[in-house]
Image: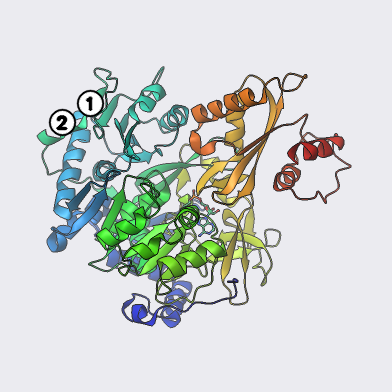
Amino acid sequence: MSQKQVFKPNREFAKDARIKNMCEYQALQDYATEDYEGFWGDAAKEKLDWIEPFSNVLDESKAPFVNWFDGGKLNVSAQCIDRHLHVRKNKAAIIFEGDRGDVQTITYLDLYKHVNRFANLLREDFHVKKGDRVVIYMPMIPEAAYAMLACARIGAIHSIVFGGFSSEALRDRIEDAEAKVVITADGAFRKEQPYMLKPVVDAALTGKTPVKKVLVVQRNHEDVEWVAGRDYSYNEMISQKKSKCEPEVMDSEDPLFLLYTSGSTGKPKGVQHNSAGYILWAQMTMEWVFDVKENDTFWCTADIGWITGHTYIVYGPLAMGATTMMFEGVITYPDSGRPWKMVEDHKINQFYTAPTAIRVLHKTGEHEPSKYDLKSLKVLGTVGEPIDPPAWKWYYEEVGKGKCAIVDTYWQTETGGHVISPLPGATPIKPGCATLPLPGIMAEILNPATGEKVGVGEKGYMCITKPWPAQIRGVWGDEERYIKSYFGDVEKDGKPVYFSGDGAVYDEDGYITITGRTDDVMNVSGHRLGTAEVEAAIKKHDNVAEVAVVGKPHPIKGEGIFAYIVLKCDEGVADEVEEVKAINNIIKKEIGSIALCDDIVFAPGLPKTRSGKIMRRILRAIAKGEKITQDISTLEDPGIVAQIEEMVK
Ligand code: WT7
């Protein structure tokens, strides 16, 4: 199956789709092009439940800092819950399936009560006020969603830290955001075994910390340490709380959450999303891209610790009044039929996952889908990295039976929601191709040198040339970094434009294929990691003199981590196995297991220019086993290249 093959939308499906054909798509995009503020103003009026209407659609006067829907007042938790009570209070808001198969259905009325009690607890017992930062370090259980929405209800800014991150990574994020509260759980279940989170929080809070209180949800009921006056049991406190809590009246541009993500340099940055623009686009993309209908059940397999979990497990589905599935377990446990069994059991209509998961399910359970009734499926989604044609084909044929659209959604933590994606009832799709910008998104592939749109087949930078409502509003505590990271590389008509960090290319139909990052950011199993971050962790090892980390193509993970390490002792490595172990332990402690290296080479030195810059391009080529074609004679020590090549062979 080559990229040239085109698959038309399922005609039956298209009849009822929100966007039914390419003419409708084009009409929307034309409207946005001709009257940008009209397009977005209409959407915001129609979709959002305003406490007070906005007076201005877009203010670009302080670009690249922008304001959307100024003057408007709303509350995101009310948009996600309260407004549905009149029409769907007994509808399932969240269906939770635990690791061990336990199922819990939470209606919109239940959700209202849980979130209100939670909000009252934070407000009354923990004195959390509007603008305070609350770190959430939680497993995939409904209380994680309640925690997010409770923060939104009282105007606190949540910052979720993925449960796979280590205590040091958690500490960094707590400190950067100056969080005063951490919400966590004792732990949860994975492959029918309890695993722990609370001890990681305890370790992150040793020494000086801004955190005053820790709220612990008891999920697996394992023993945990308890610090008197700091740690509180959610299970004990929550039943005493009232199930009504007035939502804080929030400005459109009041911050909703921070989510730390890796950049090409330095520590992870706190990507800030604000209220109105974010929730508007979360809801609109749910409706357009997944085309979720009133009786549908939507399942996104991401973890709430990533942006996909924020936008497409919690905020997007709930804002539109959908039923969203939440899964605690592992998709390959007890076997690779688990997700398909869940599709059958819960009659899932839209299934959204990452290419790395598709590859694993394909490899370990090629024929599993045919053992289950998957007739409920209408739309299949992928996100996080380019999807390779074999995985795409299996997903389309074995899972979708050739009748489901595959939406290859391209977006980022910074974009808040999808920006380039097929529409399931309209867009003819091609394997591995994110296709076209969504209506309202002015995405263009530009030549960074000239700022002009690139021609067909010519690689360029994936840019967005106009602000959009769900865009990142800032990097927490670092205005300069926001400007430099996103608006420092490309100018169009003399004006800085948003650059994603990704390369991309147009085909003859104007379709966009994302070719991957152009910077030192890696994408490991759909997790974003900066080479600088991994290098900083490895450098903490006493014996390490120098280190360079590069990404290397990996059949399942997409990208694996390849580290070149120069040790301090001249005699070489005494015990390679021990050194590797020590280095992996440091990575686990500093970042977490997601950043463990796939390959470590103890090199005699690193290829550098005479000015001392490490030539990563050469290291990437060596890791891939490619021939070095570039001129290396100008390197400080050209001989080092052959030496390293020999070691990697
Ligand atoms: C990076 C963003 C967006 C949620 C998950 C990751 C890559 C994302 C695609 C896609 C090719 C993709 C990009 C992007 N990416 N979606 N459909 N095709 N690449 O969020 O951690 O912010 O990572 O993921 O490289 O920049 P993130």
Q: Residue 572's image quarter?
A: top right
Query: Could you tell whether 306 is left or right of 185 in the image?
Result: right
Give the residue at x 86% y 38%: 638
Whether residue 70 is visible: no
Tell me, for residue 232, which label it has, or none. 1
Query: Could you tell whether 179 is left or right of 263 in the image?
Result: left
Give how far across and how far down residue 158 sits, in percent: 34, 40
Task: Judge by depth and name the residue closer to the eye, 427 or 43.
Answer: 427
Badge 1 vs badge 2, beta-carbon distance below 8 Å: yes
Task: Judge by depth and name the residue closer to the eye, 194 or 434.
Answer: 194
| Of the image marks 1 and 2, the number of the one nearer the N terminus | 1
Specify few, some or many for label 1: CA neighbours under 10 Å numbering under 14, 14-19, or 20 or more. Answer: some
Give how far across and how far down residue 559 sits, in percent: 59, 48
Give how far across and how far down residue 330 sits, in percent: 38, 46
- Asked which secondary structure carries label 1, the reply is strand
Quadrant holding the C terminus: top right
Q: Which residue is mark 2?
A: 237
Query: Could you tell whether 172 is left or right of 319 in the image?
Result: right
- Asked which secondary structure carries label 2, the reply is helix
